[in-house]
Amino acid sequence: MKQRKVEKRTLKSELHIQESNEKRTIEGFIPYNSKSVDMGFFEVICPTAFNKTLSDGYDVKAIVNHNMSQILGRVKNNSLRLESREDGLYAECDLPNTSYANDVYNLIKGGYVTTMSFGFECIKDEWKYVEGEEIRFLQEVKLEEISFAVAMPCYEGTDSVTRSIRGMNLDELGNTLSKEELKDEDFTQIREYIDKLSDLLPKNEKPVEQPETNSAENLTESEQRKQQLLRDLMAGLKELKN
């Protein structure tokens, strides 16, 4: 069974803090039906996206900047509470008395950090063209973690943490290709990327040197550049694979 990859998104969110009876709480928000910035495509989180995660009672963790060694809270002990409402997923986390939790609290309190992030595995999505824009609709995901004290934004509730095309993690591919020696699993990953990239190209198309008149005339200059880039990338990957 193919293992799904964890994707990360960073959101510009209005983080709120509360303190009472020696209890400190952070509140954050992941918006529904809000289009992301351009990540090579656009992305929208559907209101159904987190339903299964919540109904299954999955032990989502709240952590510092995607660092699992710095846990701020978790669903299992109710220190992290998640609630899906009409406009988005609300996250409320009671902070432990640790040095890194104190740092997070003070950064948010002082207005130094206004973003949060979340890591997820995509279970079900749908790609559509809407008014000429390619949009990925996340219909169901498995929420793995929520991170506070993350410095960048991809919806307007967020900047993507990873560069991607159609959900392919290009940073991960770059890390693989930069290795001095590739292993069998690396070549397996490269083959998967070749297959995915092939799906993005027009079917039954002649080589660039001999383009079909109709298809070339109908493509915009940016689309031609995009297709040429995909061809070059695929050619390079195939050479490496062989």
Image (cartoon, helix red, strand yellow):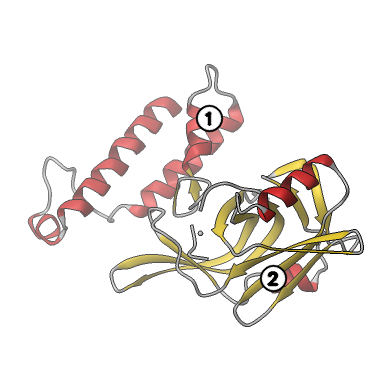
**Residue with the most extreme front position:** 110
The amino acid sitting under disc 1 is Thr
Whole-percent x, y for residue 24 in the image:
83, 59
Q: Which mark is residue 90?
A: 2
Q: Residue at x 19, y 50 (%)?
A: 224
Q: Residue at x 52, y 17 (%)?
A: 180
Q: Is 49 displayed left or right of 194 in the figure?
A: right
Q: Nearer the viewer, residue 215 or 110?
A: 110
Q: Is 28 displayed left or right of 33 in the figure?
A: right
Whole-percent x, y for residue 51 in the image:
70, 74
Q: Which mark is residue 1?
A: none
Query: Distance of mark 2 from mark 1, alpha carbons?
Result: 36 Å
Q: Is 29 displayed left or right of 187 in the figure?
A: right
Tell me, yes or no, if residue 114 can be seen here.
yes
Q: Dot 1: few (<14), some (14–19), or many (≥20) neighbours within 10 Å?
A: some
Q: Which residue is mark 1?
A: 176
Whole-percent x, y for residue 107 in the image:
67, 48
Question: Helix, strand, or loop for circle 2?
Answer: strand
Q: Residue at x 56, y 54 (%)?
A: 10
Q: Is 51 displayed left or right of 230 in the figure?
A: right
Which image quarter: residue 121? bottom right
**Residue with the most extreme bottom position:** 86
Q: Earlier in the sequence, mark 2 or mark 1?
A: 2
Q: Dot 2: few (<14), some (14–19), or many (≥20) neighbours within 10 Å?
A: some
Q: How many marks?
A: 2
Q: Residue at x 16, y 43 (%)?
A: 208
Name the mark nearer the viewer: 2 or 1.
2
Tell me, yes or no, if residue 242 can be seen here.
no
The amino acid sitting under disc 2 is Tyr
